[in-house]
Image: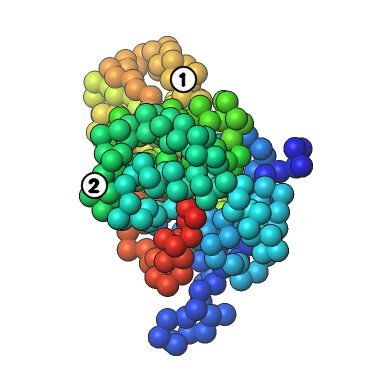
Amino acid sequence: MAMEPIIEAQALTKRFPAKKQKTTAAQQPPAVADLTFQVARGELVAFLGPNGAGKSTSLRMLTTLIPPTAGTARVVGFDILQRPADVRARIGYVGQLTSGSFSQRARDELLSQGAFYGMSKHAARRRADELIDSLDLGSFAARSVQQLSGGQKRRLDVALGLMHAPPLLFLDEPSTGLDPQSRANLWQHILELRRSHGTTVFLTTHYLEEADRYAERVMVMDRGRVIADDTAARLKAELAGDVISLGFDTPADADAAMPIVAALTDRDVRREDAASVTVTVPDGDALLPQAVRALDADGIRVQRATGVPPTLDDVFLALTGRTLREAGEGEPAEEPADDASAEQTGASR
């Protein structure tokens, strides 16, 4: 088992019942369609896309909270339909809904989670204290869950998912609602888990800078389908590129510069304003000084030169013609409330 992928999904598809009987389930577009991919042990994979793209539904299928309509998957070596209990025993899952028992104190909730996973009382206390310290839960560990703020509940949810130090950790928007310090502490703990235990991390996030900085691999989903899967660096270089802007003394200089820059970069050159031009290229660091030298050799003085590296939102824009923010505005929920409620009852237990 050590050499096999820790996640293997083959044509996973999920359709939800039609609402108000206007269409049949078969006529409705699937929430997730033909999801096929593998994740190697130890990888940190970021799963990106707008609200309603199918990310959370995909995670719920992989964590056995909802069954797929079609397709198969093996997680930590077990079939998600045939051996769901074995899957759940070996994964951590932090969903988007609060999973704590509101009447129980935060620290006791962690101890209960440890007992559920078969940890001894001593090991559970030690692990709970470790998480309380690393995720900065100490100021509210003795409070009941219902007394916590939204951000505090989120940090407790993350701690519950990490309690048994699982080999595979699913995180659905783990840092939403956290302040910058708490986000930094959370990522420090995730990275330490990977370094110390080789933990595999599969997460969704709307903080694209997190995916860019920490993920070894980025999967982009839109309208229920994966539309890109590669490292962040390659996706940005191949699909987006660096934006080079060159400013000149006069509009006439900008006019004269456009064919020179176009010939040098073999790309379409755009007019940013009357006296400046812009071009998107895959290797801006190398091409920017070349462009300045070429223009100077032709007697055109560059007054201003800037290079802006691409973002993962630029990648999504290149793939779909819209940004992640634009794509998420007005998107419907991925699934009916009844199905979503399964997460609240089954995420951490």
Whichever of labels 2 and 1 marks the residue nearer the N terminus, that label is: 2
Circle number at residue 149: 2
Give the CA separation, mark 2 to mark 1: 45 Å
Which amino acid lies under the numbered mark 2 shown in the image of this protein? Ser
In this view, the residue in front, 46 or 60, is 60
In this view, the residue in front, 145 or 118, is 118
Q: Residue furthest front?
A: 121
What residue is disc 1 on?
285
Q: Is residue 107 above or below residue 277?
A: below
Q: Secondary structure at mark 1?
A: helix
Disc 2 and disc 1 in contact, CB within 8 angstroms = no
Q: Secondary structure at mark 2?
A: loop
Q: Is residue 32 above or below residue 181?
A: below
Residue 8: % across, % down: 69, 51
Tell me where residue 229 sits by quadrant.
top right
Q: Is residue 264 above or below residue 97?
A: above
Instruction: Decide if residue 256 is on the left or right side of residue 194.
Output: left
Image point (56%, 52%), residue name: 227
Instruction: Decide if residue 37 is on the left or right side of residue 177.
Output: right
In this view, the residue in front, 261 or 239, is 239
Image point (59%, 67%), residue name: 67
